[in-house]
Image (cartoon, rainbow, N blue to C red):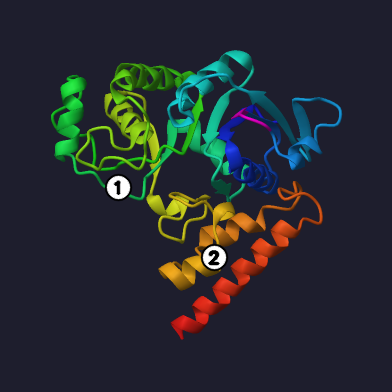
Amino acid sequence: MTDSIICTLFENDYHAGFGALVNSLVKAGFSGTFVAGYRGTLPDWIHERLTGNPNEFSVDTVSVHLEQLETDVHFTLYKPNYLLKLAERFPEAKRLYYFDPDIIVKTRWSYFESWVNSGVALCEDVSSPLLETDPTRQLWREDFPKMESRAKDPVYVNGGFIGIKVEDLSFLRLWKEVQDKIIPKLGTVDFSAGDRSDPYFIFDQDLLNITKELTDIPLIITDKSQMDFPDGGFIMSHAIGQPKPWQKNFLADLVLKGHRPSKTDKIYFQHTYRPLDVYSKHSLSRRLKLANLSAARLLSRVIAS
C-alpha cells in the first residue's frame, strides 16, 4: 500500500468527474486511500457500491472514503483546510495530494510520488504567465507587504492540483493563513462576476499564487501542457471552464457555437465505465452521451476537411 493519501471535493453533478478520476487512478496504478469530501446527496451509482459500509468502498487497489461535509465555505476555498485535516486524520501518510474532480490522471502513479520528493508539486495554469511586474501583483502586495517588489518568476499556477510531502505542510498552513485574511473581503463567491482588474478575480488560484510568492519551500512546477493546456501533456487532463464534459451537448455546441469536442472530453468518457460505471450499468444516458460525442467528432472532421 502506498504512503500517499489522495483527496477531492465535489457536490452536485461533479460526482461524474469524481468517478472518472478514481478510474484514472486505478489505471495509473495507485494503491491506497482516496478521500472524497462531498455536499448534498450521493447518486445511485455510488449507492450501488456502498453495500457493506455506508461511507467506504473499494475499487481494485483503491480504498474510497466518502465524507459528507457541513462547511459552508465554497469548496474551491476549502482545499488547504481539508488537506490539513487529512494530515491529522492519517498521521502515517507521507504524502498528500488534492485533485479537482474534473481532472483525469494520465501517467503512472509512481511519477506523482517522485514529483513531491524535492518540493511542492504544482502545475502552470492556462492563463500563465502573469509577469513579475504585473499590476495585479502590486494589488496583492497592498494586502501582503512581505511579497517582494518583483515576483520570483512569471509563472501563475493552477489551483486544481497540489502534491505535498508531510515535511512541507507549512506551505498548506501558509496558504490557509492567506485565505483566512482575504476570504472576509470576498463576499459571495461568483466566478461569473468581475474581471482580471479585480485583485482576487480567480479566488483560489490567486491566493495560491500569493502563497507561492511568500513561501521559502521549494516548488516543483510543471508547464501548462501537463494539464492539456493545450493538448500534448502526459501527466493530467483538466477540464477547466464550463460546461464540464459530462454536462455538454457536443453536437449542439459544434453546430450552434462552433465548439469542437476537446481531447479532454474524449479522455473523460474513456474513464467513465471501468472499473466504476459512473452512469450505472446498462445506462442509456452514457450510450447517448457517447453517440453525441462521436457524432460531433465526426462532423468536426468533415467541417475541417
Image position of 30 (left or right of 207): right
Residue at which label 1 appears: 128
Residue 122, picture quadrant = top left
Q: Is residue 305 magenta?
A: no
Q: Can residue 91 be seen in this view?
A: no
Q: Which residue appears at 28% of the width and 21% of the height? A: 185
Q: How crowded is mark 2: few (under 14 residues within 10 Å), some or many (20 or more)?
A: many
Image position of 261 (left or right of 158): right
Q: How crowded is mark 1: few (under 14 residues within 10 Å), some or many (20 or more)?
A: some
Please state which of residues 9 and 283 is positioned toward the viewer in this rendering. Answer: 283
Q: What stretch is highlighted in magenta?
A: 37-41
SS assignment at label 2: helix
- Looking at the image, which residue sits at the far bottom? 305
Q: What residue type is labelled 1?
A: Ser
Q: Is residue 222 visible?
A: yes
Q: Where is residue 277 in the image (x, y as percent from the top left)?
A: 75, 49
Residue 41, picture quadrant = top right
- Seen in the picture, residue 167 relative to 133 is either above or below; the reply is above
Which image quarter is the N terminus in?
top right
The image's mark for residue 227 is none
Of callouts 1 and 2, the N-terminal one: 1
Q: Where is residue 90 in the image (x, y as percent from the top left)?
A: 63, 17
Q: Which secondary structure class fits the magenta region best?
A: strand
Residue at which label 2 appears: 250
Q: Which residue appears at 17% of the width and 20% of the height? A: 145
Please state which of residues 299 and 166 is positioned toward the viewer in this rendering. Answer: 299
Q: How far apart are marks 1 and 2 (CA)?
A: 28 Å
Q: What residue type is labelled 2?
A: Phe
Please state which of residues 3 and 299 is positioned toward the viewer in this rendering. Answer: 299
